[in-house]
Image (tube, grey):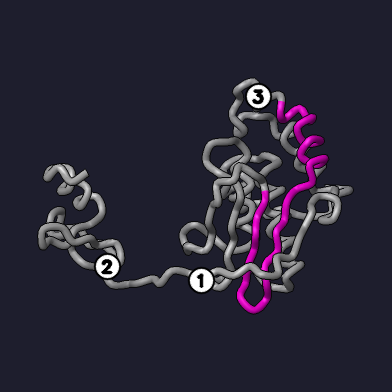
Amino acid sequence: MQGTKHEIPDWAFEFHGHRCPAMPLGYLAGKYALKLLGIEKEKDTNTYVFSETGDEHHQGCFDDGVQAATGCTYGKGNYKRLHYGKMAIIVYKPGKGAVRIRPKPEILNECSKFEFSKYRKSGIPASQVPREVSDEVINYILSKDFEELFYYEFLKDFTYSSPKKTMARIVCDDCGEPTYENYIKIFNGKRLCPRCYEIERNKSGNL
């Protein structure tokens, strides 16, 4: 689009499921973090994102954008939610450092003034908002430089050690389902998955 300074790939919108302002904002936040740290999109699990969003609010769409841009995902285990109720991320790569990115309040305020917000506040799902309405606020975001959209801060003392992962599985003695070994719990001499462990504890009165 004329006047835009960034592009969001179509597949990112398809992955997310609808067109809204929060996903592109997250995508650009992720891209900006990679730029500031001087790193590429993560292909494996050597970069980590800690999102300050949560579950009990709207605009969690921000997280899908961050995942699409950074390559850090829930599935790979290198994307964590901190549940602070804020639209902000920390991107960390050992040897490169950590940076915290957050949208500027004035940007969030301006986005809320677009007609898209009126549709959403009236209860209309984002997927049913007319394309021209959603694109109006999306193009507003895409027309801004990174520096206009976000504040950033390098976190000098930030460190994180990823938990040890395993590929080994053990068959649960109750349900018979293969369970990764580091989730197996022992109860009355039986090796149990977490679900069966809780069932056995409840049966025995060990709450």
Q: Position of residue 146 (x, y in %)?
A: 82, 56
* Disc number lying in front (1 or 2): 1
Whether the magenta-drawn stretch holds residue 113 is answered as: yes
Marks 2 and 3, Cα distance to the nearest angstrom?
46 Å
Can you tell which quarter of the image residue 155 is in?
bottom right
The residue that label 3 is drawn on is: 121
Which residue is nearer to you in this view: 24 or 45? 45
What residue is rendered at 65% in x and 24% in y? Answer: 121
Q: Find numbered disc 2 in the image and state the secondary structure of the residue it sits on.
A: helix
Q: Earlier in the sequence, mark 3 or mark 1?
A: 3
Foreground: disc 2 or disc 3: 2
> Outermost residue, top direction?
122
12 to 166, vertically: above or below: above
Q: How many residues crowd around disc 2 within 10 Å: few (fewer than 14), some, or many (20 or more)?
A: some
Amino acid on which disc 2 is placed = Glu
What residue span does the magenta drawing correspond to?
A: 88-117
Q: How crowded is mark 1: few (under 14 residues within 10 Å), some or many (20 or more)?
A: few
Amino acid type, label 1 = Ser
In the rendered image, which quarter contains the C terminus?
A: top left
Would you say residue 100 sits in the magenta stretch? yes
Could you say whether the residue bearing mark 1 is in a helix, strand or loop?
A: loop
Return the x and y of residue 77 as percentages of the image width and height: 47, 62
Which dot, 3 or 1, sits closer to the camera?
Answer: 1
**Residue 7 horizontal/vertical position (percent):** 76, 54
Q: Depth check: 6 or 64 in front?
A: 64
Q: Is residue 4 rendered to the left or right of residue 38?
A: right
The residue carrying mark 2 is 181
Question: Residue at left 68%, top 25%?
Answer: 119
Q: Give the answer, above or below, for where 5 lies relative to 204.
A: below
If you read the primary sequence from the N terminus, does the residue marked by circle 2 or circle 3 appear first? 3
Q: Mark 1 points at which residue?
A: 161
